Amino acid sequence: MLGPAQGTIAGVTAITTHEPGLRERTRRAVRSELIEVAMDLFGEKGFDATTIEEVAAAAGMSRRSFFRYFPSKEDVVLGHLDDLGEAVAAALTARPEGEDAWTALRRAFDVLIADTEADPARTLALMRMLDTSAVLKARFLERQMRLQEPLIPEIAARLGLKGSTGGVDPRPRAVIGAAQACIEAALEAWMAADGAPPVRDLLDDAMRAVRPGSL
Amino acid sequence: MLGPAQGTIAGVTAITTHEPGLRERTRRAVRSELIEVAMDLFGEKGFDATTIEEVAAAAGMSRRSFFRYFPSKEDVVLGHLDDLGEAVAAALTARPEGEDAWTALRRAFDVLIADTEADPARTLALMRMLDTSAVLKARFLERQMRLQEPLIPEIAARLGLKGSTGGVDPRPRAVIGAAQACIEAALEAWMAADGAPPVRDLLDDAMRAVRPGSL
DNA sequence: CCGCTTGTGTCACTGAGTGTCAAATAGATT
DNA sequence: AATCTATTTGACACTCAGTGACACAAGCGG
């Protein structure tokens, strides 16, 4: 695992760059395949009613192997969230220095909107799926919650709070959570309207409602 | 079950009033006992590491009977939330007509603060427990989310939105979710400070940070 | 061709949650 | 007090998620 390299050339690139390497590439391919197959089944039978056994079989592998690619059933659906979270965090730090927290968050969320608009059907399917399974929704919310943590220092700075106020200042988390609630509300409304109105507008409405006079 | 009555006098009162009735009272007693025993064990061994078998045994009943009192392990810990949710909803509707949504929510949350202050140790224990178990936290968040729904019409009215805008208007949900994020942030900070500062102040800080100039 | 790393299937196990059924039990009736 | 009846309970069996162990097959470097 931590040996100098696993292949003469591939090994070097794997260490020095972000080049996936063959190993990682096949792994990703299997994961994608698994996600595709699983989402189809979940759509047909419902998330709760579909067993991992069925998903694995449909993907041509054993139940045990499924768990070598995903730690849980929920992760097949929610795996995407972590990437999105990182993207938002990156977008946030990339915002101009003096911009206020609320505006910066709104702009950072543009990457979420872009992701949604890149494949509206997929996001719509995911949202609807969340409404059919309480456990799935629960894990979804918990994951979203965890994504708040890394944003705290950035937001604390934009709120004008000096140094590390640690976890004892509720304000950064409150602001981030509030913004996240706006996303959630916007997507919920978007889903209720079958994806008709632009998410962008719904999010603007939501964030302006929470903080009148902003944006 | 739906027969005219189960006791001459008790039956009448059971139908006409909210009097618990003996049956319901013993049921509640067993539930309380179960909660107490379970919380102790969860505190000692951790939520995830404690099996229902152990909880049931400690309460002197079979595993199967446990599930006749609680639908899941998480419900032992989170059952309290539904009552709290109803109390908040009631407090919200009891607020004066013209009061704006944000202020009304803040005031409605006073019942949560009262509940916390009634037994700080219990709330503190619960909060810490949430941080030790991802599944528990997940279910906690999901339940909290569900409590938003009944508040929507009330908040929609206070936002000055006409009639039933159905689920297509993100604003009521956004405002409620934002307020809830403030509660969450306040409690998190309160826990981080070992329950030292008054929750009331932390919540005020949080809600003012989200909506400057309010309250 | 050999050896090593890695991926896979099989088996076995724990633990949550559910259905079924027979025994116990508590309450009401006579 | 004896009995009838609705409810509660324990016991058993089952499904499904998730994990550990192990033997086997495959890919790749030497």
Image (tube, coloured by chain):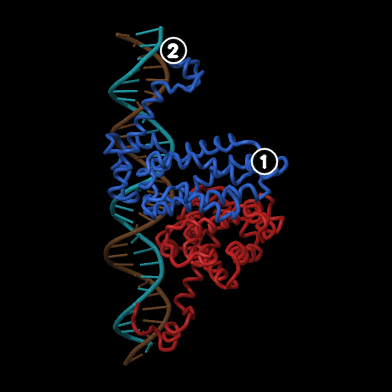
Chain colours: A blue, B red, C brown, D cyan
Q: Is residue B133 above or below residue C21?
A: above
Dot 1 lies on which element?
Answer: helix
Give the image quarter of residue B196.
bottom right
Chain containing mark 1 = A
Residue labelled with disc 2: A9
Camera-side residue: B163 or B49?
B163
Q: Is residue B18 above or below residue A211?
A: below
Q: Position of residue A47 (x, y in %)?
A: 34, 49
How far apart marks 2 and 1 lie (CA) works out to 44 Å
Of labels 2 and 1, earlier in sequence is: 2
Amino acid at the residue labelled 1: Ala
Residue labelled with disc 1: A157
Q: Position of residue B181 (x, y in %)?
A: 57, 54
Q: Position of residue B112 (x, y in %)?
A: 60, 64
Camera-side residue: C10 or B60?
C10
- Counting labels gives 2
Work out whether residue B40 can be spotted: no
Residue that appears at 38% across and 25% down: A25
Give the image quarter of residue A63.
top left
Amino acid at the residue labelled 2: Ile
